[in-house]
Image (cartoon, helix red, strand yellow):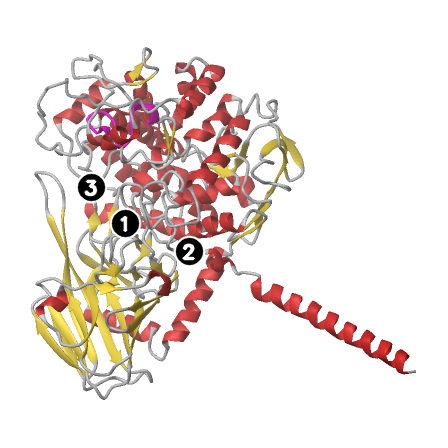
Amino acid sequence: MKFINNIYRTKHVLVLVLGIFLLSCTQHDNVSSPNNTDYIDPTIGNVAMFLKPTYPTIHLPNQMLRMFPVKYDYLTDQIEAFPLIVAKHRDYGLYQLKIVQGEVTADSWKKNMFIDHDLEVFHPWHYSTYLIDDHIRVSFVPSARSAIYKIDFEQTKQRSILLQATPDLESEFKEGELMLEDKLKYTTRGTESVTRVMSTYVYAQILDENDALIKAAKVNADGERLTIQIPDEASKTVVVKYAVSYVSADQAKMNFDKELKGNSFDEVLTKGKDIWEHTVSQIKVQGGTEAQKRTFYTSLYRTYERMVNINEYGKYFSGYDGKVHKSERPFYVDDWVWDSYRAHHPLRTILDPKMQNDILNSYTLMYEQSGWMPTFPQVHGNHMCMNSYHSASIFTDGYRKGLRDYNVEKAYEGIKKNLTEGTFIPWRQGITRRPIDDFFHRNGYFPSLAKGQEETEPMMDGFEKRQPVSVTLGMSYDFWAMTELAKELKLQSDVVKYAPHANDYKNLWNEKHRMFIPKDEEGNWLDIDPKLDGGLGYREYYDENNGWTYAWDVQHDIEGLTKLLGGKEAASARLDQLFRESLGTNKSSFYVDGSNSTGMVGQFSMGNEPSFHIPFLYNYFGTPWKTQQRTRFLLDVWFKDNIFGIPGDEDGGGMTAFVVLTSMGIYPVVPGEPYYTITSPIFEEVAVELQNGLTFKVIAKGASKKNKYIQKAYINGKEISSPFITHDQIMAGATLELELGELPNTEWGKNPIVPVYGN
């Protein structure tokens, strides 16, 4: 009987243990099953190969209040300051704070704050670090137009918050409440330069851990410097709640009341996390590795840094006419369209067409307010940067994808003015046409200086140079985009007059080099090495990239480029050569001038925007399996989930949008044409929840590093033989299903039929 009882007891113990084990496994799965936000790491790419790193920006999606600690890059173990707001991408911010324990001296303003990287916390909605020397923890959470710094001191004696601004700083402090006004100044480039000035306002409260005003705090204002002294009797935790405005001091207070009044640090943190989880969960993925998910969702997070809505509850200040406007509609600024038209705007058109409509409306209003359609719109006005007028592209692309909730005719007017009345001189957008532009309109190319010839155009930038090939190719595309929009608006006379400029790129095609080579004003080819000549960034002839990259910069006329290359087979072989061609010199010499051309594979530069569409050109040449091989390789090699994980300037979503789209298995090679080309996705399933309530899916069972070649493809169960999908199909909730294999199917897509808009 004892033996039986032991068996009975043992059996129940085993059942109990097994039940606990199964329950713990289930609970463990629930706990460890990550939210998509768990994959976001703002430190990815924080160390650059040569140029600018990514910054660990803390913000809510597309909102004006952004912050990152001021330091050169991730490797630096000292923080210079904590800004109250980063007004424009990659800027170090306005109203910079330092936290000091001990006596404030002249050296306190110069001293950096020593940190331990392992004690930093980085999330899009929350940042925290520990200042080793002063034994202080600094934490930060953002809202849309406001934010909170929480400062935990280990001591209560001699505590100060230092604020550095500009000599224009004005302040008012009373019983724990602080009002600030300062000036944001920006001087445009060129001999016709102007200085724009706009006010920025801050309303802040200095609070204790119970959210009560520290009325005994004292402020010492000394020009551009402000010292806030915390009384010894106050709590160890000091909370700085503040809101920012570009409209007025009263508006800053209103922003504060609407967003922070009655809300604690933890409540703002939780709300921010929920907003981010909702935002990035619009795209759900299955399959792939943990590292690939980290890269993917971090890239997706970065695409929401720009543009930013600066409408403040019914009002916005425009740097384009210096006035405050009343409007309930968002007003978006901070964009670099030379970078973002390629993938960033098209991605947003899928994910948030309402926002993209508002962005196009904002561009149109900027034109109405300033007289020029902007290309690099920032909070203070248009930033003259790069070359060409690619704002034409985002309107044509949006219009053909159904985005028309703005004054389209007025937008077209601005696009046309840029292209017909504006200068094409790099970094001079918004300046009227010059004699060198008249030459372009007459001859169909931007002329190069002859070798040894001194610059004759006083408006030319001494560093940026003429960039004649990139300007000619870029303007050819822009004239195409403009005249395609003119077709939509039934402006036939403009189509007849300006459409021929879309072919201007052919004027610089050189049969000997089989690429685009500069010509001087006499029509003579320059005898150059298109790999290495042109000085820093090859700017005397190209721009940031050499002739091998610009050999493919004809997105709008791939058929014409194919003919120049001798047909599809020859074009595919030439594209192979791009990825295999040597640097032409050793790496150390190459990067003296080619520091923008990073992430090199042969002569292909993954780290610069004009290269993004190039691997997808195989789809047009009848060898799509090579696109599948190249894109998978490029993502695997150059976009790692670590601090070195971005191969070039990320440009506030410009590059990471490429990662998001390519990882999904689609890419918009020709912005302005409402279709996407297909490649092998990273994940086994991607589900995009569209704003219209439908879901677009990409299914690729078994997708992996080896299992990447498309054998067959189906859209909504119907087999397709060409690697393309239309925007309408995506927005109708299509399912794109790809059968993958380890070896290429060289027959699939061999005779591609490219979608034709309107058919």
In the image, 739 versus 8, the foreground residue is 8
Q: Nearer the viewer, residue 564 or 430?
A: 564
Res 676 visible = no
3 or 2: mark nearer the eye: 2
Residue occupying the point 57% across, 28% down = 722
Identify the residue under disc 1.
Answer: 365
Compared with 646, 229 (above or below) is below
Q: Position of residue 524 (x, y in %)?
A: 20, 12
Identify residue for label 2: 41
> For the residues marked 2 and 1, what is the alpha-carbon distance in whole angstroms?
35 Å
User: Is 4 positioned to the left or the right of 649 in the image?
Assistant: right
User: Which quarter of the rendered picture does the N terminus lie within?
Assistant: bottom right
**Residue labelled with disc 3:** 384
Please provide the residue range marked out in magenta.
537-549
Could you say whether the residue bearing mark 1 is in a helix, strand or loop? helix
- Which three-letter amino acid code belongs to the residue tagged 2? Asp
The Cα–Cα distance between marks 3 and 1, rounded to whole angstroms, is 18 Å
Element type where label 3 sits in the image: loop
Residue 550, position as x, y percentages in the image: 32, 26
Q: Residues within 10 Å of mark 2 (few under 14, many from 20)?
A: many
| Spatial separation of the CA atoms under disc 3 and disc 2 | 32 Å
Amino acid at dot 1: Leu
> Which residue is painted at 25% across and 62% down in the image?
85
Instruction: Report whether residue 35 is seen.
Output: yes
- N-terminal of the pair, mark 2 or mark 1, is 2
Q: Which label sits in the foreground, 3 or 1?
A: 3
Magenta highlight: main SS = loop
